Amino acid sequence: MKSYDIVEWGKPLQLQVRETPQPQGSQVLVRIDACGVCHSDLHIQTGALDLGNGRKATFESIGVQLPFTMGHEIIGVVAAVGPESDAVVGSRCVVYPWQGCGRCHACRKGREIDCENGAALGTRRRGGYADHVMVPHTRYLLDYGTLDPLVAATCACSGLTAYSALRKLPDMEPEDSLLLMGAGGLGLAALGLAKGMGCERIVVSDIDDDKLMQAARGGATSTVNVQQSDAGAALRAAAPAGIRAVIDFVGSPETVELALSVVGRGGTVVVVGLFGGALPLSTALLPMRNIELKGSYVGTLEEMRDLLALLQREPLLSVPLTTYPMSQINDALGALATGKVVGRLLAIAGE
Ligand SMILES: [Zn+2]
Ligand SMILES: [Zn+2]
């Protein structure tokens, strides 16, 4: 099999050829059709995540060994199954990549995303920038029915991340505004989904006018370029009855600080972006203003199932999709690194 791997941290991916593994036990071998290219891959590729205040978490310290295959938005076809698997060879599927150890309390309760020994595809175990991927169990293979296969792929990370963050919001009245910070692939996915999940007034902020234009076309009630000195005032003005909730898809100290300063009393701030860094937080501010500050990391298997069902009833995702041949995966990652990509990129296997 072929894969495009990190061979050296921080360097372009390299083509690696090795024997295609045979599925054992409950394993399922999936022949990959396409894999979404995620902004988080740019972080993984560097080998470390910035935790702020000079602290870094390296991927090596959590057991990621090189060469390593990234890619976690995988669609494909079941190619071979282990003797204990009931997966059907030839069936099409989208893979839930956020797998846990399967044995701990969190895993047994269906919260594999909270497993302390997570074994996610493309971030801990070999993922989708390849022609095949090994999936440990058929329960991670989801049928995407009539959904566009490429849209289904994006449901494994960007769609799921947006959906799970939206499920963490308080009840939104028609006058309440939701602020989405960041109009990249995730922000646009959340914009589409939010309207189908009861949010009527949606303000989108970014520092890129092209992305904001895309958000306006996608149905944002208003858009605000926050690269201005009075960004807070502009955001408040865009939400006459107040900002009830914020989802921050950037996650920089500046955006979280801005989110906390503009959200209304009793509001919720959900941080999703992994930009990294740290900020001094006024601890009295949270109780005095009755603010809820929480993080949201991708989503559960059940949420992904719900999302796929929702999208088959209502085509809420209108994120522009751009494809690259898998052999040009480095070009796709490079394009993403410029910060100029509108929508979502996918690598098509076999090309
Ligand atoms: Zn991702
Ligand atoms: Zn576990």
Image (tube, rainbow, N blue to C red):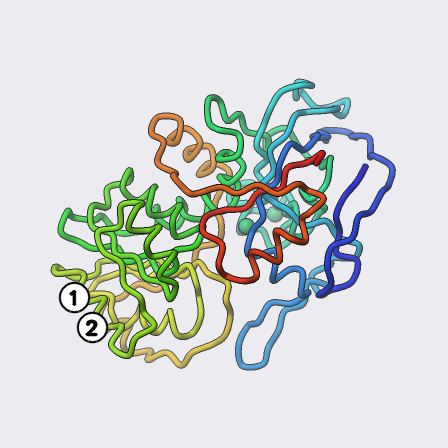
Left or right: 250 with respect to 135? left
Left or right: 168 with respect to 327? left
User: Of 324 and 187, which appears nearest the observer?
Assistant: 324
Q: Mark 1 = which residue?
A: 237
- The disc label shown at residue 148, or none: none
Q: Does the beta carbon of the residue at mark 2 sit less than 8 Å from ligand 1?
A: no
Quadrant position of residue 29 = top right
Q: Residue drawn 32% across and 69% down?
A: 226
Q: Residue drawn 64% across and 60% down?
A: 44
Left or right: 205 with respect to 343? left
Give how far across and how far down residue 334 sits, in percent. Answer: 62, 58
Q: Mark 2 = which residue?
A: 233
Q: Does the beta carbon of the residue at mark 1 sit less than 8 Å from ligand 1?
A: no
Circle 2 sits in a helix, a strand or a loop, which is it? Answer: helix
- Point out the image quarter for the N terminus: top right
Circle 1 sits in a helix, a strand or a loop, which is it? Answer: helix
Give how far across and how far down residue 73 sits, in percent. Answer: 58, 42
User: Of 197 and 182, which appears nearest the observer?
Assistant: 182
Give how far across and how far down residue 288 sits, in percent. Answer: 22, 74
* 326 w.r.t. 251: above or below: above
Mark 1–mark 2 Cα distance, whole angstroms, equals: 6 Å
Q: Residue drawn 75% across and 51% down?
A: 5
Mark 1 vs 2: CB contact within 8 A: yes
Check disc 2 and give the amino acid type. Answer: Ala
Q: Residue drawn 24% across and 41% down?
A: 198
